[in-house]
Structures are given as structure tokens and as C-alpha cells.
Image (cartoon, rainbow, N blue to C red):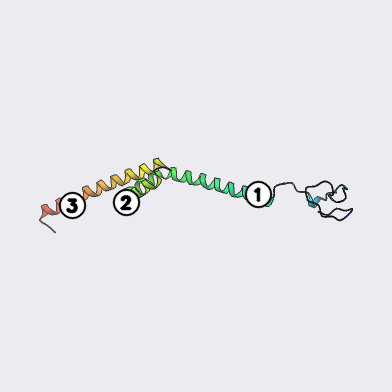
Amino acid sequence: MKCKKCGFDTPNNSNFCSHCGSPIDFDDEFISIDSKTEEEKNEEHTKNANENMNQMMNIDISRASIGWYFLGFFFPLAGIIIFFLFLYKKPDLAFKARRGAIHGFILSIALTFLFIITVSLKGGL
């Protein structure tokens, strides 16, 4: 903002000219309601966006924990990998994926033996 008396360029938040000392008259167009700089606004926006994303991720993971069980059930290797990935971050999710993997593996072994026994009783393929 320029001083009306001497024309010196003063900071926007000063009440007096730093060159001649005369009071600065504010025009309506120069009054700033928000005293935060653009950098502070961007930092606050980024922080809020990160917090919102973390909250959404936590909600989605906790609500979809039954899905991790079924993923482990139908794909046991994926369930074991998820177990080791989330063991310390989300132990409840990790144990559900592991439980699904174990149940899926046991069921696949049981069905394999049942198939072998059925084929052998019928006399082969």
C-alpha cells in the first residue's frame, strides 16, 4: 500500500508510514479480514485434507474388515500377505485376513481330499 503523503510503499498491516510517519488511511478495497498469508492458508488446507483422508481411510478399513476375511478366504496367499502387512498397524484387520486365509486353505484341502476319494471310489477318471 502506498502512503498518500509521501508515496512510500508500506506493508499492508501497518497503521503508519515507515518513511514519513503519517497515519495510513485505509480504503475499503484494501482492508483484509483474514490476516493469514497464502502460505499459511495452503498449509492449513493441506493439513485439513490429510486429516480428512486419514479419517476416511480409518473408517473404510474398519467397516470393510469382513471383506478382508473373504479376501483371505478365497485367496489364502493374499490373506497371509495382508496379515504380515497390517500386523502392527491394524491388528484386528490382520487377524481377520489370517483367519479367512486359514479357513480357505483348510476348506481347499478338505475338498481336494474329497475329490480324490470320490474319483478313486468310482474307478478313476
Report crowding for label 3: few under 14, some 14 to 19, many 20 or more residues within 10 A (C-alpha). few
Q: Position of residue 84 (x, y in %)?
A: 37, 46
Report crowding for label 1: few under 14, some 14 to 19, many 20 or more residues within 10 A (C-alpha). few
Going from N to C along the chain, the mark reached first, 3 or 1, is 1
> Could you tell me the amino acid type at mark 2?
Leu
**8 up-or-down from 103: above or below:** below
Q: Which of the two residues, 45 or 10, is positioned nearer the viewer here?
A: 10
The secondary structure type at the circle numbered 1 is helix
Q: What is the distance, in whole Å, between disc 2 and disc 1 at their CAs?
A: 46 Å
Q: Position of residue 103 (x, y in %)?
A: 28, 44
User: Which quarter of the rendering shows the C terminus?
Assistant: bottom left
Q: What is the distance, in whole Å, between disc 2 and disc 3 at their CAs?
A: 22 Å
> Could you tell me the amino acid type at mark 3?
Phe
Which residue was labeled with disc 2?
77
The secondary structure type at the circle numbered 2 is helix
Going from N to C along the chain, the mark reached first, 2 or 1, is 1
Residue appearing at x 28%, y 47% in the figure: 104
Residue appearing at x 34%, y 47% in the figure: 70
Q: Position of residue 13 (x, y in %)?
A: 78, 47
Q: From the image, state whether disc 2 or disc 3 is nearer to you.
A: 2
Residue appearing at x 84%, y 55% in the figure: 8
Which residue was labeled with disc 1?
41
Q: Is residue 116 left or right of residue 38?
A: left
Residue appearing at x 59%, y 50% in the figure: 46
Q: Which of the two residues, 51 or 4, is positioned nearer the viewer here?
A: 4
Q: Which of the two residues, 49 or 113, is positioned nearer the viewer here?
A: 49
Which residue was labeled with disc 3?
115
Q: What is the distance, in whole Å, between disc 3 and disc 1 at their CAs?
A: 65 Å
Q: Residue furthest bottom?
A: 125
